[in-house]
Amino acid sequence: MLLYGAGRAGIALARDAKNRADVEVVGFLDDNNQKVGTVIAETRVLGGGDLLERIATTHRVDQVVITMTSPPPDVVRKALTECRRISATLKVVPDLQALLLGHARIEQIHDVRIEDLLGRQSVDITRHEPMIRQMYSSRRIAVTGAGGSIGAELVRQLMRVRPRSVALLDKDENAVYDLQQELLALDGEVKIEPRIVDIRSEERLQAVFMEFNPQIVFHAAAHKHVPLMEENPCEAILNNVGGTEVLLRACRNHRVEQFVYISSDKAVNPVNIMGATKRIGEMMVRASARQGGLSAASVRFGNVLGSRGSVIPLFQQQIARGGPVTVTHPDVARYFMTIPEAVHLVLCAGALGRCGETFVLDMGVPRKIVDVAHELISLAGLEIGKGIEVTFTGLRPGEKLNEELVESTESVRTMQVEKLWMVEPQGSNHEISLEAVNQLIRSARQNDHLRILAQLQDLGIGFRAPDTARTVQVVGARAQAAAAASQVQAPLYFSASKALS
């Protein structure tokens, strides 16, 4: 075994290997020239990474382990290519988040994953640990959508800073059960309270809040699949808008100290229903904070690797079946980051936001989806044209070629937290009236999807429904005329006493 990186993780792995009869470490590689030739943890540094192939061949190495906790993707890519040439396997140590939970061991190393080849540097999560602990330790915290990818990771990272208790709120009983079992295997110092609840059910949600009395709420529950929500706009409104309103009202009624809303880059100039509901959610959170006194923030980010229903698991399933790997368009590109990194920055934003601010995560450089598909095929040891193909299926309804993190009417301000920006909106298109929200909910309950499209178009958030433009234009004109007659002096969104009807 050859260890690439003579830092903390590499030293821990070298020491662990000393106690094993089945593992022999021949030496370190390290790109710091001052370390070359020295002995660290009884292991000699044989050279830099540029000598990987030569040193591995000389010492007949059958396995190389990258022991840098955040290796540059080009380093991983180059090492992977060289290892394949000499028939050696390449492994990596866990990310820093995992290493914080224990010492590096041989059992923890794993194969190179797509997140290791993303083309962006990860956040150094140790820098923000004191701020996160101060905010969340010994607090009662509720997480909606706790059974989902983001919600579950929120809970895992919160557990590490020892809150008093965590309520797992989700309507998916199987997901809650699985997460509960995972958490029960931990040390048990944090009280876990699973609650099967639909956030649209006001009576049920108010009862849960009365019982648990949360101090901090993370709102990760949402319908997120763009094509499905294009076909089911009423459900998207009822869940993503109506459910958020019910939850915000519960937070105000029970004097929640901090509310954090998980948004999406699809909320920027939304061309699909899901993105429009997320944009409305941001506006509702801002209004609740500014007019209702709720300390709150929204966090906007793009694709997270490995989340349920995302493109990476789909590609992996297609590769396992032998293809073809389906990409919608050769030029479609997306921002990517790992789930642990995204959640860490959400925790930071929750500690900073107070007045309904929207925070944007620096997602790095967008990657073409077809390039991601090629890298996954390569990781599987396959070649395009030799047993597997990539085919293009065309953009789906509501899909953009490129996503955006901010719009033209927004500016961003850097924060003390690396890779976290605060959006500073300008103009009235960042406000929403109570009546506009009520109208959307009523249309959804009446299953009037055409009127929903018209109402979304009339909100001035940039939404357009390209497939039904003429119909929406007619219906929208009627809705706008009716709104003008009834909302001459319409109140903004927040109302402490008026419930949605």
Image (cartoon, rainbow, N blue to C red):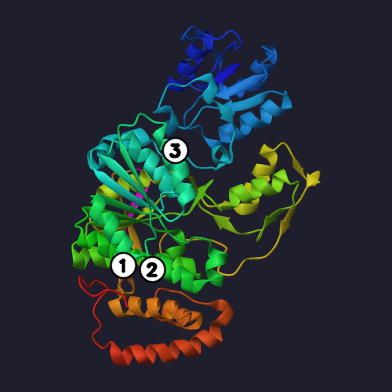
Amino acid bearing label 1: Met
- Amino acid type of disc 3? Gln
In the rendered image, which residue does mark 3 sit on? 181
In the picture as drawn, the residue positioned furthest to the right comes out as 386
Residue 400 visible to an observer of this rendering = no
Q: Confirm or deny contact between disc 3 and disc 2 (CB under 8 A).
A: no
Residue found at x 66% / y 21%:
53
Give the alpha-carbon distance from disc 2 to disc 1, as whole Å: 9 Å
Residue tagged by mark 2? 241
- Whole-Å distance between the Cαs marked 1 and 3? 35 Å
Task: Provide residue 119's location: percent of width, then percent of height.
Answer: 54, 42
Circles 2, 1 touching at the beta carbon (< 8 Å): yes
The front one of 288 and 428 is: 288
In this view, the mark in front (1 or 3): 3
Q: Secondary structure at mark 3?
A: helix
Disc 1 marks which residue? 284
